[in-house]
Image (spheres, rainbow, N blue to C red):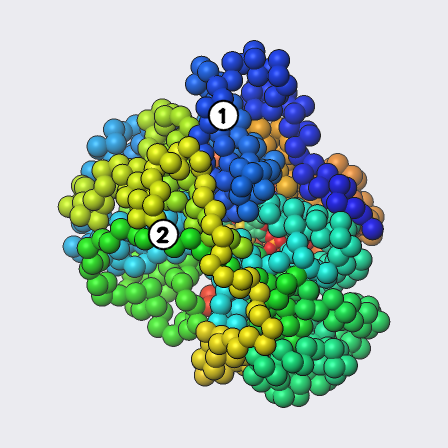
Amino acid sequence: MANRRQFIKLSFMGAGAVALSSGAYGALNFLSSPEEVKRLKVDLKRTPTYCEVCFWKCAGWVYKTSEGQIWKIIGNDEDQHCNGRLCPRGTGGVGMYYDEERLKTPLIRTSDRGKQVFREASWDEALGYVAEKMKAISSKYGPESIALFTHGSGSTYFTTLLKAFGSSIIAEPSYAQCRGPRDEAFMATFGEEVYSPEITDIRDTKCLVLIGSHIGENMHNGQIQEMSDAIDKGVSIITVDPRFSTAAGKSKYWLPIKPSTDLALLLAWMHEIIYNNYYDKMYVEQYCSGLDKLKEHVKDFTPEWAYGITTIKPDLIRKTAKEMANAAPAVIVHPGRHVTWYGDDTQRERAIAILNALLGSWGRRGGFYRPAKFDLPTYKLPVFPEPKKSWTDAFPGRYPLASSPVSNAIIDATIPDNKPGFEIKGWIVNGTNIISSIPNQANTLKAIQNLELLVAVDTMPMEITGWADVILPECTYLERYDMLRVSPHRKPAIALRMPAAEPKNNTRSAYNIARGLALKMGLEKYFPFEKQEELLDWQLKQVGSSLEEMQRIGMKTRERDGDDLYFGEDEKVSFPTDSGKIELYSKYFEQAGFDPLPKYLPHEEPPEGFYRLIYGRAPMHTFGRTANNPNLTDLMKENALWVNPKVSREWGLQNGQYIWLKNQDGVTSDFPIRVRITERIRWDSIYMVHGFGHGQKGMKRCFGKGASDSQLMTKVLTDPIMGGTGMRGNFVTFVTKKAESEVAS
Ligand SMILES: Nc1nc2c(c(=O)[nH]1)N[C@H]1C(S)=C(S)[C@@H](COP(=O)(O)OP(=O)(O)OC[C@H]3O[C@@H](n4cnc5c(=O)[nH]c(N)nc54)[C@H](O)[C@@H]3O)O[C@H]1N2
Ligand SMILES: Nc1nc2c(c(=O)[nH]1)N[C@H]1C(S)=C(S)[C@@H](COP(=O)(O)OP(=O)(O)OC[C@H]3O[C@@H](n4cnc5c(=O)[nH]c(N)nc54)[C@H](O)[C@@H]3O)O[C@H]1N2
Ligand code: SF4
Ligand SMILES: [Mo]
């Protein structure tokens, strides 16, 4: 089995390559020999930050040269998210600041939507324009006809703005395009979600089961480090993935499952664990309800039954079930994170939750720990006006168990043909490139055509800004304050982000943008602090610290109040579910008209000559947001198409050849992608990394590099329970030649 060093090397393989970067920024960031430090006159005064290149939010220190140039970011040793080490993307975050193609000043559109003809505007004019439009839309249709799509740190301020304005139509892609099904399933089972960072106790686990979750390429930092430690300690890893992922390479068992059939495997594992009495009897008796019904339900779901569906041999299903049981309760059946796959995702996640309950891993060392959060008072704002409509009024009864607004439902409510209960007329889109992150682009573009206002708040000229009426350029995370990071972890902690440099060009922080809009609309009472640092200082003083102290120390970690990281022996635990128990059988689902126990339902198969489109992450990029980052494009310029040799032979494809992809609905990728022939993918699927194939000419480093998975996702398998957009029901075939006139340039 592979050892820790090899794994770290593989996962962090970007880091070494960065040092060899030929790009000017690469040199600036990564050469750190004493001579270099002297030559660059490094100013050892450092400012704290937490990273925004992905949402793991590692805390770090930003160093500058004495000439005031941002030089390098390193991890904060005290931080539980990163333990002093940033991943290649976090290290390369400096490139976001230096990218000369950043948005520089507010822009107002001067021609038809989508044509991308804009004029520069002052902040006063741009904010005034947006405020007037918002007020006009509100007086015609009500404030609820303005929706916010948002992701990342700026969400807090735009959420306050929208609520103050009178709308609660606020959606994040991290719900219906990412974690939503997992959070609903774990809530229904344990009464609690798995949070971010996930409360998986990987460092002490003895058996880690990864179902799709591709840690190693998915670079969530602390998780990778803990997995490396666990590898050192001899953890056995079971990876279920149609592709031989980085994690599969470190695994005792790789189960190359037929895509879309995971629920059958999970049911067979439950069958094995229950009928062989492998489950944790004490735990289940004490904490769970519904075992009898579950036992009856999985009676026929034998490994032989699952073999016919999953292509995983019965013997392997048995062995892996035993492996989990041997390690229990120090076992984690990882819930994954991006789980919107096939439209039955909440049920698949329920099966994962139930399996963890049977193994007794929730609340146990090496399973799932109890998180602790720094209790930081929030400043009391005046009461928000009561919105007359909520997002659920657009399509009453749809997605009954969604606990957060569903972005795709809001898009649907912007299209009058769909006859929504009320129409959405304005969008503010902050920090999310919804053209690429929500599948069925044609639907999003159709919605956009019906808008009376589209405002994009972004740092880069991405796809969404191309469609905006007004573009409000935010400065990068290295140039601003944001709210204190208080994510739950093993120990409660707070981390500060402060500016390491002045905002470049004519950009502003999201706080200032949202407050600027509030002022223009007479809503200043919801933004009582002129400067964000005053708010942070107020907050910190409530807990005996101050902004000045945090600027010096960067983060504060406290010990937990008690010895309660795991359940105590025989501890009476009341779970925050209706019954106070872990609900193996979900009455909550039953009452809402859904299966109380997960069932396997077959999914559509690829038509002849087509292959299932599956996708994932690359260690050196985050979605599309890093696509133009000078440091990171140096490490990976484009994505590749993984094709099984059996398939490439059939099609006569060569390694390195560029081809286009056409999906089941006749949509062909704008840009070609390079073929990578490999045994590491099943023959019925092809694989690519998400976040490439950008068509925005304002981003020269990434324009036309690789193909976009999003473009090929015209079919969406929507989860009826909570609205998640299953993205893996699309099939593609190969196009080796395109007419000259059809080639995008
Ligand atoms: N096809 C496909 N779709 C997916 C996924 C997939 O794998 N494939 N993954 C899904 C998942 S798991 C998620 S979480 C979502 C993520 O979806 P998004 O959050 O939409 O991710 P990005 O595409 O990176 O878009 C982020 C946008 O924020 C901008 N940005 C970056 N930093 C800042 C900042 O500091 N301030 C502001 N205002 N803007 C900033 C970037 O320029 C970019 O336009 O996508 C989902 N959609
Ligand atoms: N470097 C990097 N790291 C990231 C991110 C990033 O953009 N870049 N994004 C972060 C975010 S927001 C998220 S949500 C996470 C997502 O990370 P994960 O939760 O790990 O992502 P998934 O999309 O669930 O997993 C992708 C894997 O699923 C496999 N797969 C495809 N179809 C099937 C199937 O039917 N069954 C099974 N068992 N496997 C299948 C693919 O081959 C691939 O290996 O990553 C996070 N980490
Ligand atoms: S995992 Fe990497 S990109 Fe994500 S926050 Fe941490 S350092 Fe930044
Ligand atoms: Mo995500």
Q: Position of residue 305 (x, y in %)?
A: 76, 78
Sequence-wise, the earlier of marks 2 and 1 is 1
Q: Position of residue 703 (x, y in %)?
A: 54, 33
Regarding residue 105, the answer to whether it shows in the image is: yes
Disc 1 residue type (three-letter): Tyr
- Relative side of 390 to 432, left or right: left
Front in this rendered view, residue 208 or 663: 208
Query: Image point 48% across, 72% down: which residue?
Result: 191
Relative to 248, does residue 672 appear above or below in the rendering? above
The residue indicated by pointer 2 is 376
How many neighbours does mark 1 have within 10 angstroms: few (below 14), some (14-19), or many (20 or more)? many
Front in this rendered view, residue 110 or 460: 460
Q: In the rendered image, which quarter is residue 82 located in?
A: top right
Query: Image point 68% across, 51% down: which residue?
Result: 227
**Label 1: which secondary element:** strand
Query: Image point 80% across, 57% down: which residue?
Result: 252
Q: Position of residue 689 (x, y in %)?
A: 63, 45
Relative to 12, does residue 210 appear above or below in the rendering? below
The residue indicated by pointer 1 is 63
Query: Image point 58% across, 85% down: which residue?
Result: 290
User: Cβ of disc 2 within 8 Å of ligand 3?
Assistant: no
Front in this rendered view, residue 125 or 84: 84
Disc 2 residue type (three-letter): Leu
Which residue of the protein is positioned furthest toward the front in this rendering?
Answer: 562
Relative to 616, does residue 105 appear above or below in the rendering? above
**Foreground label between 2 and 1:** 2
